[in-house]
Image (spheres, helix red, strand yellow):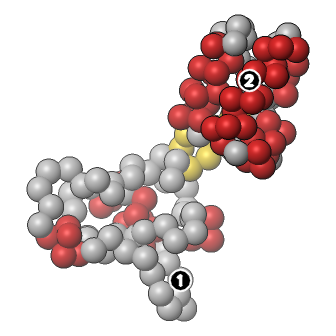
Amino acid sequence: MKEELDFEKAPYQYALCLNRECPKASNCFRQLLENVAPADLEYWRIVSPKYQANLTGDCPFYRPYGKMRYARGFITALNSLTYPAMHSVVFQLMSHFGRRTYYRMRKGERLLSRNEQQYIQAVFKKFGGIEPIQFDAYEEDLDW
């Protein structure tokens, strides 16, 4: 059975879908979230029904309902590197994600998506890190 969706946990301005005729509506985050939207919500961000009416093939806005394995933090992996390698990894990650986001990711304050984990793995590999690196923690959460 599917976990009950909480509208408050949805990303800010997450686009909803009103197309109940869609064959994938029963498993689409955008449609499922629309079903649990609070009645006092004045404004919504939606996928345009006119756009959907002219759509052929798969919907580019379809988001399958499910969970994903997120990672938290990589301080332990950084500590396993030599100082010159650690300096290079930190510089490259800060250049890519920005200083503030880098520190939040490193300390585990921000979940790392699958793509972010792969990018971090590639940077560690490029500078001689053990492969695959182990992040400090892992958790399952909805894959918005």
127 in relation to 98, above or below: above
Q: Which residue is mark 2?
A: 89
Residue found 42% across the figure and 69% down from its top: 15
Total number of numbered discs in the rendering: 2
x%, y% of residue 31? 37, 66
x%, y% of residue 42? 50, 91
Q: Nearer the viewer, mark 1 or mark 2?
A: 2
**Residue 47 falls in which quadrant of the image?**
bottom left
Q: Residue type at mark 1?
A: Pro
122 or 16, which lies in front?
Answer: 122
Residue found 11% across the figure and 56% down from its top: 56
- Few, some or many residues within 10 Å of mark 2 (<14, 14–19, 20+): many
- Few, some or many residues within 10 Å of mark 1 (<14, 14–19, 20+): few
Q: Residue type at mark 2?
A: Val
Relative to residue 53, is residue 64 drawn left or right? Answer: right
Residue found 64% across the figure and 13% down from its top: 125
**Residue 83 falls in which quadrant of the image?**
top right
Disc 1 versus disc 2: distance between alpha carbons? 44 Å
SS category of the residue bearing label 1? loop
Q: Which residue is mark 1?
A: 38
x%, y% of residue 35? 42, 74
5 or 64, which lies in front?
Answer: 64
Relative to residue 45, is residue 110 drawn left or right? Answer: right
99 or 7, which lies in front?
Answer: 99
Residue 112 visible in rendering? no
SS category of the residue bearing label 2? helix
